[in-house]
Image (tube, rainbow, N blue to C red):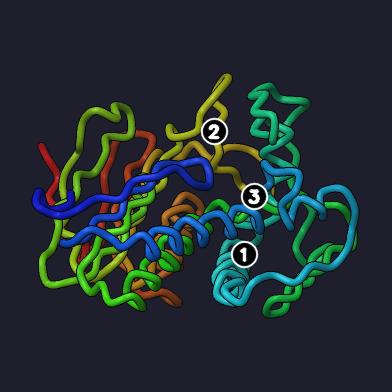
Amino acid sequence: MPHADWSSFSFDGIGTRWEISTPEALAPAVRHQLLETVGDYDATYSRFRPDSLVSGLSREPGRITLPGHAVALHEVYAALYRLSGGAMTPLIGSSLERLGYDPGYTLAPSGDPLAPPRWEDVLEWTDTALTVTEAVALDIGAAGKGQLVDLLGGILQSTGHSEFLVDGSGDMLHAGTHPVMVALEHPYNPGQAIGTVELHNSALCASASNRRAWGDGLHHVLDGTTGRPIHTMVATWTMAASALVADALATALFMLEPAQLQEEFDFSWLRVSSSGAATFSHRFEGRLFT
């Protein structure tokens, strides 16, 4: 958690709570830049806003031009789509909406689970140019919050802040000479922790099926090849150089074995299966409570 004597700037954005901690209070101009960046990201990618850039593609096919940071987002999604055989896909929005996780938050399924269209059939994404040949519900929630964490960290660094902790409701990026100790939330009891890990000049992200759960066994981590919730894992944590990669891999660990991901990504990990078994990489320098 942040050091007790640090200053904190808290706000809401993209549907979650943010806290940015620094040794000294942020100047009003820096705060404005941070809030503007969060607002711009939401206006680009939110499928819950009818006026967002991607929401237009849910009504009709077409082409949009994304911001420059979409290049890195595409690279991560393309790699994980390939490695997972389509299980992790930015087209998962239609499957989520069918199960009730829709812009109106009805949380009431409109039918049986249904896989989204395949990337290779409907989506062409090159750098910042994204074209779809049919109406689709894009959802980059598996990596987007992590990327936004990185973007906010970049603003802090560019404005002279070398020590900081960006915390987007558990997706974190730390920089500086003073590490922070982070509690690992219990997947079945948010008020408890299953362990701790030291975060130092890196990102830590988590994914848990209990975070957005509703109905009879429904939650937000779906298999893109079936449209069904994944029930073999309940929680994952990953540490990497960027929050974009850490966030994406935290979701990918629900679908893939760590060894498959480690062939292309440099990260450490911890995951908890639905049976309660915890496994972790030798580089995950955390401490689990017994």
- Label 1 sits on a secondary structure element that is helix
Locate residue 222: give its quadrant.
top right
* Cα separation between marks 3 and 1: 20 Å
* Cα separation between marks 2 and 3: 19 Å
Q: Amino acid at mark 2?
A: His
> Could you say which disc has been placed on residue 226 in the image?
none
Q: Amino acid at mark 3?
A: Ser
- Disc 2 designates what residue? 219
Locate residue 245: give its quadrant.
bottom left
- Label 3 sits on a secondary structure element that is loop
138 left or right of 74?
A: right
Q: Amino acid at mark 1?
A: Tyr
Residue at 33%, 58% in the rendered image: 238
- Label 2 sits on a secondary structure element that is strand
> Could you say which disc has been placed on residue 81 in the image?
1
- Disc 3 designates what residue? 46
Which comes sooner in the sequence, label 1 or label 2? 1
Other residues around mark 2 within 10 Å, as few (<14) / some (14–19) / many (≥20): many
